[in-house]
Image (tube, rainbow, N blue to C red):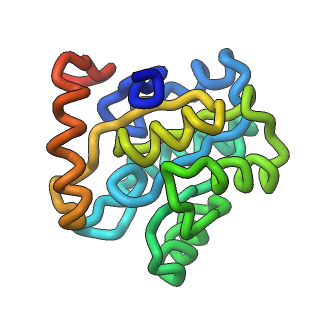
């Protein structure tokens, strides 16, 4: 069950403390797009996410969006808008895109963390690639039909999980 367990559970991406990441030796954040950085219902990153990304950049931490989304233009536009690098068509939970992102960013797996909102794609890909993982709650309830299906199974694994920053 190790593949289905994150190293940390945080209520939202912007609540991940940048100083804590620096103290842990993190110099590269790999992050999912849909419902992690950008809500599926608005497709625009909220101000607190933008602020968090700016804080990462100020701390010298590089960011790469690793997205399964097949709408390449939308994913690339989001990455450009947010000032982050991107690997699209990631095919998570396969770890290949995580390795590609690490190579592009010049970071080792020990220097990286993968942040995402899905246990069976984001967390599993990070765990298979050997990077630390942080699971965040999705920003909205709107999901693709197959993601909604997998969320039912995720809930079984997450029934006893407490998220940092959750009220």
Q: Quadrant of residue 143?
A: bottom left
Task: Give percent across and percent down for residue 128.
Answer: 58, 36
Q: Is residue 141 left or right of residue 123?
A: left
Q: Residue at x 33, y 54 (%)?
A: 35
Name the image quarter holding the C terminus: top left
User: As drawn, which residue projects farthest toward the right?
Assistant: 106
Q: Residue at x 51, y 31 (%)?
A: 133
Vertical order, 163 against 135 (above or below): above
Vertical order, 158 against 92 (above or below): above
Task: Give percent across and percent down for residue 166.
Answer: 23, 24
Q: Quadrant of residue 27?
A: top right
Q: Is residue 11 left or right of residue 36?
A: left
Q: Is residue 102 left or right of residue 133?
A: right
Name the image quarter holding the N terminus: top left
Q: Residue at x 66, y 53 (%)?
A: 96
Q: Residue at x 53, y 43 (%)?
A: 125
Q: Is residue 114 left or right of residue 57?
A: left
Vertical order, 124 against 43 (above or below): above
Vertical order, 131 against 46 (above or below): above
Task: Give percent across and percent down for residue 23.
Answer: 67, 16
Instruction: Judge by depth and name the residue closer to the eye, 11 or 160.
Output: 160
């Amino acid at each position: 069950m190790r593949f289905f367990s994150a190293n940390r559970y945080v209520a939202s991406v912007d609540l991940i403390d940048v100083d804590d990441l620096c103290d842990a030796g993190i110099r590269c954040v790999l992050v999912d797009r849909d419902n992690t950085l950008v809500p599926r219902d608005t497709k625009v990153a909220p101000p607190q996410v933008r602020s968090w990304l700016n804080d990462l950049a100020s701390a010298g931490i590089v960011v790469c969006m690793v997205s399964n989304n097949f709408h390449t233009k939308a994913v690339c536009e989001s990455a450009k808008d947010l000032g982050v690098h991107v690997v699209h068509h990631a095919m998570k939970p396969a770890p290949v895109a995580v390795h590609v992102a690490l190579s592009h960013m010049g970071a080792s797996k020990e220097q990286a963390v993968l942040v995402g909102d899905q246990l069976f794609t984001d967390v599993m890909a990070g765990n298979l690639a050997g990077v630390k993982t942080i699971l965040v709650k999705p920003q909205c309830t709107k999901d693709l039909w197959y993601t909604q299906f997998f969320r039912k199974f995720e809930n079984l694994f997450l029934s006893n999980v407490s998220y940092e920053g959750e009220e």
